[in-house]
Image: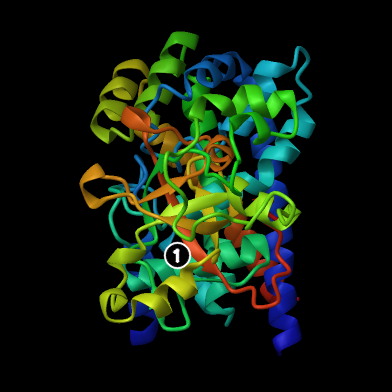
């Protein structure tokens, strides 16, 4: 019985995904004329309805703006997986950016676990943040070891050009330097700073009573961040606390995290989903992660 | 029966409203999927795929009836999720727009029913 029902699901899933691909291709072919317009405008538009725009994600728009000849079929294939993620998320996320209910979190966790193939949870070791859906703001680079500076911070001129303007924070991260010295500075330390986030650890329930326990738990704790507007997701680590409640933002991302997710600070700020990754063996690498 | 109605209510409460949700629904398809004894996850996934398909088809129906400039206006209204503005604009530009959207949805829904019936007979 289980096998039969499983095959029913698989059959319908395959058939309806193929149907979706055909509809998508048809849509692309017929209405390419407005795509350039939307790709140029996507960063200025306040994307309140992700479900409504589920085709026209930023990665796709970027593909169109950067290519002279559009291969519709490959675009449709590239869009497919993130479109389903965006669509799945849009059906559950509230219209307003607010703390999620347990029921909403439950569906979202199942959705994200299914799409990315990693264990995700809003609560780990009986600890949870104050929320899992909120506005992300921009953070600066953090000093990774004593003597680290902007000149030593990047591996290549492209990164330097792109990320230099963010500057370096005047203070250290929540747990100080990532390495005791430049000599001891490892690839792992580099990735931790590159893909770090700051979260409101101090707003966790129980934090004030067990500060050391909570700080130890949060130190470099991996979290999956997802931009529900474009389906982009990234494995990050917690390396700082913040932002303050009065900022109206709920977490902060390193320049590299913000750039990848295509999130901006200020008037254009937007929300992300953020959940713990249950990775006791430290197997999941930091950085961008694709829908499976 | 009571469990089914509760599940459907819970599912609908978690779903975001689209600009056509007030007259396009897939309750009958959900009932059919309920009868297949799929897991909650599988049901939700298939329902999500159905919604995605409907959305694509409805967008195509609407965009096909609009001029280039009106397409842009429609997409901007859509991105702002302003349902009132969306319909004000569409009713002004497309004759019997709601009927056309409904026809597109009904045609696609019939295909989904057909697929479910075929699978259940296997």
Q: Is residue A289 visible?
A: no
Q: Going 71% across and 24% down the picture, which residue do you hit?
A: A158
Q: Is residue B86 above or below residue B15?
A: above
Question: Is A35 left, or right, of A43 in this rendering?
Answer: right
Q: Is residue A11 visible?
A: yes
Question: Is A111 left, or right, of B17 in this rendering?
Answer: right
In the displayed orientation, state which residue is furthest to the bottom. Answer: A1
Q: Going 57% across and 31% down the picture, which residue do you hit?
A: A58
Q: Mark 1 — residue?
A: B28
Question: Is A182 left, or right, of B34 in this rendering?
Answer: right
Q: Residues within 10 Å of mark 1 (few under 14, many from 20)?
A: few
Residue A183 in picture, x, y percent from top left:
74, 52
Residue A196 in picture, x, y percent from top left:
54, 51
Q: Is residue A67 above or below residue A193?
A: above
Q: How many marks?
A: 1
Residue A170 in picture, x, y percent from top left:
42, 39
């Amino acid at each position: 019985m289980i096998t039969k029902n499983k095959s029913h699901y698989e059959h319908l899933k395959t058939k309806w995904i193929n149907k979706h691909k055909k509809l998508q291709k048809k849509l692309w072919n017929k209405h390419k004329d407005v795509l350039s317009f939307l790709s140029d405008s996507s960063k200025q538009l306040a994307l309140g309805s992700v479900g409504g725009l589920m085709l026209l994600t930023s990665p796709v728009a970027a593909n169109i703006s950067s290519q002279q000849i559009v291969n519709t079929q490959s675009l449709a294939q590239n869009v497919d997986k993130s479109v389903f993620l965006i669509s799945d998320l849009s059906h559950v996320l509230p219209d307003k950016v607010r703390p999620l209910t347990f029921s909403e979190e439950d569906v979202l966790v199942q959705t994200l676990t299914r799409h990315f193939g990693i264990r995700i949870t809003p609560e780990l070791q009986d600890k949870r943040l104050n929320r899992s859906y909120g506005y992300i703001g921009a953070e600066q680079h953090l000093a990774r070891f004593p003597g680290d500076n902007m000149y030593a911070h990047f591996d290549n001129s492209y990164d330097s050009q792109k990320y230099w303007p963010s500057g370096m924070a005047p203070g250290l991260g929540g747990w100080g330097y990532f390495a005791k010295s430049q000599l001891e500075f490892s690839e792992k330390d580099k990735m931790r700073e590159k893909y770090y986030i700051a979260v409101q650890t101090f707003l966790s329930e129980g934090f004030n009573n067990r500060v050391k326990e909570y700080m130890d738990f949060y130190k470099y704790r991996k979290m999956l961040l997802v931009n529900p507007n474009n389906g982009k997701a990234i494995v990050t680590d917690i390396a700082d606390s913040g932002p303050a409640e009065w900022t109206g933002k709920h977490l902060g991302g390193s320049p590299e995290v913000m750039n990848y997710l295509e999130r901006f600070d200020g008037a254009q700020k937007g929300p992300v989903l953020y959940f713990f990754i249950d990775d006791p063996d430290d197997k999941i690498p930091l950085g961008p992660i694709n829908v499976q | 029966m009571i469990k089914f109605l509760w599940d459907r209510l819970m599912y609908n409460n978690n779903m975001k409203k689209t600009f056509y949700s007030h007259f396009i629904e897939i309750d009958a398809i959900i009932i059919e999927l309920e009868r297949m004894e799929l897991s909650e996850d599988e049901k939700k996934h298939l329902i999500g795929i159905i919604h995605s398909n409907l959305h694509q088809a409805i967008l195509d129906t609407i965009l096909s009836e609009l001029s280039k400039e009106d397409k842009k206006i429609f997409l901007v209204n859509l991105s702002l999720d302003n349902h009132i503005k969306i319909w004000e604009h569409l009713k002004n530009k497309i004759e019997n727009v709601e009927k056309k959207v409904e026809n597109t949805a009904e045609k696609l829904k019939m295909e989904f029913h057909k697929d479910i019936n075929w699978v259940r007979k296997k």
